[in-house]
Image: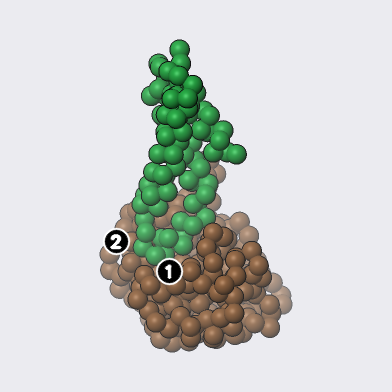
Amino acid sequence: MWFLVRAALAAFGLLVPVPRVAALIVIVVLALLRVEIRWSHEDVLLGNLGVSQLTTYTVAAVPVIALEIAAGVVGRMLLGPGV
Amino acid sequence: MTRTSHDYLFLADSIGKSFWGKSVLKSATMWARPGVITVLFGLNGSGKTTLIRCALGLLRANHGMVRYDGRSYLRPQLHRLSRLGLFYVPDRGLLSRRLRIGKQVRLVADRFETSDTEEWLERLGVAHVLDRPLVTLSGGERKRVELAMAGTRNPRCLILDEPLTEIEPKDRPYINRVLREMSAEGCAIVVTGHDVDDLMALADDVIWVVGGTTHGLGTTEQARAHHQFRREYIGPRGA
């Protein structure tokens, strides 16, 4: 559900020409927030395995961000270029 | 006997930490020595967990320095320390809800190429939980699995935040015995908690966290003889 909401936000953001950069920033911030919430419990487990927090969050965030941008692009293709 | 910093495998020195202007730690110090079990006592909210988290870089300290294995760190990071043999078991739990227990234990074994995982699981009586998800484990089983993971790691330094919480009283001496065996093999161990009797039976060295600072009280006999510690922390029962 949360993903759908953010995908909708991303689609909306990419539909509007001017604030695309802002939309991307929102996508990245929301993705990082989600990754932080999902992975903050595992950071000690991974830290004990010698994995840095930066690596953890980067690896976790990249697919989330990519998915949301893809959702935005698909939304734009389906709904047109917007304003 | 005077100790130097070379006696410590791990030393977090003069750690200070404030949250939103409220000082939790003014200048606190903790240490771990090979073959010694150091117990960190302190009331709830005294800053024990904050001290450990700052010492391991999970919180950024306002000031202070960490030494581990002869290297100094102004900004320590858990993953760097863990590569040098440190293992940390937090009070909130170490295990992930997203992976089966067996997978998590194997992660540690594979990462550090150890082969005595089964032995540790058997020793701690949790070999039967490997295929179960975390939510089906009791608090005591979780703690024992975490200790088995720590044992599998074969750490040089083990830091356990409140390991006896949720452990049945009848199992506590058993956990203590496992920690004692690890210590005898040279592991530097730090334990926190409130169970005075059990932890005093375990401790070689006592640190008291109070008033935003720490007092190294020495052996359990010296700690019990410390008038202020007895009066303000352990009370008449432990005297």
Chain given the colour brown = B
Looking at the rendered image, the quarter that the C terminus of chain A falls into is top left
Contact? badges 1 and 2 (CB < 8 Å): no
Give B168 or B113, whichever is nearer the viewer.
Answer: B113
Horizontally, is B235 left or right of B128 in the view? Answer: right
Please say whether residue B34 is visible from this viewpoint: no
Which is nearer the N-term, disc 1 or disc 2? 2
Q: Amino acid at mark 2?
A: Ser
Horizontally, is B174 left or right of A62 in the view? Answer: right
Instruction: Tell me the chain of label 1.
Output: B
Residue occupying the far right of the picture: B237
Whole-percent x, y for residue A15 in the image: 45, 20
Label 1: which residue?
A: B107
Please say whether residue B70 is visible from this viewpoint: yes
Q: Quadrant of residue B9?
A: bottom left
Whole-percent x, y for residue B130 in the image: 55, 74
- Classify B95 as above or below B35: above
Q: Which color mode does the image show?
A: by chain
Chain A: drawing colour: green
Say which residue appears at 64% left-offset and 70% top-offset. Answer: B137
Q: Quadrant of residue B72?
A: bottom left
How far apart, in angstroms, are the residues tagged by discs 1 and 2? 29 Å
Label 2: which residue?
A: B72
Label 2: state its secondary structure.
Answer: strand
Say which residue appears at 48% left-offset and 45% top-offset. Answer: A35
Looking at the rendered image, the quarter that the N terminus of chain A falls into is top right
Mark 2 crowd level (few <14, some 14–19, many ≥20, 10 Å Cα): some
Residue occupying the far left of the picture: B71
